Amino acid sequence: MSRRGETFQAQVLAVLSSRDGPLSAYDLLGELRESNPKIAPPTIYRALAALRERGRVHRLESLNAFIACQCENHQHASILSICDDCGAVEESVAPDLLEKLATVIGKSGFAPLRHVIEVHGVCAECGAGQAPA
């Protein structure tokens, strides 16, 4: 990989890391155009793909957006909790859950290639002011 590509990936990761919530590729494009006026969408998507491959960024499938990885351990798939009120995303890892999921799925002969576990709801901060259901 070129030095320039690594530098740009570092810029993308810095923007994602500085945010409390997810950003779309076009949000990133807008943020990075100030320092990189000639940047085009394919450049953003290539950087995001490289960062995802290295486990530094996660794509939120349900939102078509991205967040910086919050966990150190990438040996297991992440569970992403997404607050539908404030947009905060929390990353967790539960190896036992993923092992059980693989066992259940494997009984039918299905071979998963990747796991995407997203849970939508309300975070503790947003839920504190709501009455119980």
Image: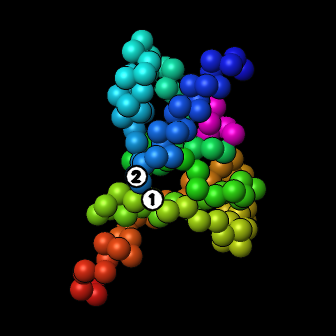
| Residue range highlighted in magenta | 50-54
Mark 1 Cα shell of 10 Å, populated few (<14), some (14-19), many (≥20): many
Q: Does residue 118 belong to the magenta stretch?
A: no
Q: Which residue is mark 1?
A: 89
> Residue 78 appears at what percent x and percent y?
61, 59
Q: Is residue 12 found left or right of 26 in the rendered image?
A: right
Q: Residue at x 71, y 73 (%)?
A: 96
- Secondary structure found at label 1: strand
N-term mark: 2 or 1: 2
The location of residue 42, given as percent across then percent down, is 49, 20
Determine contact: label 2, label 1, CB under 8 Å: yes
Quarter of the rendering containing residue 39 = top left
Kind of residue at disc 2: Gly
User: Dividing the image into 4 quarters, which one contains the C terminus?
Assistant: bottom left
Work out which residue is located at the far bottom of the displayed protein and give it. 132
Marks 2/1: CA–CA distance: 6 Å
Report the quarter where the N terminus lies: top right
| Image vertical order of residue 101 relative to residue 25, above or below | below
Q: Can you tell which mark lies on residue 21?
A: 2
Where 54 falls versus 87 (above or below)?
above
Vertical side of 83 occupied by 13: above or below: above
Helix, strand or loop at label 2? It is loop
Name which residue lies at 40% across and 42% down: 23
For residue 75, side relative to residue 94 (left or right): right
Q: Position of residue 52 (x, y in %)?
A: 61, 39
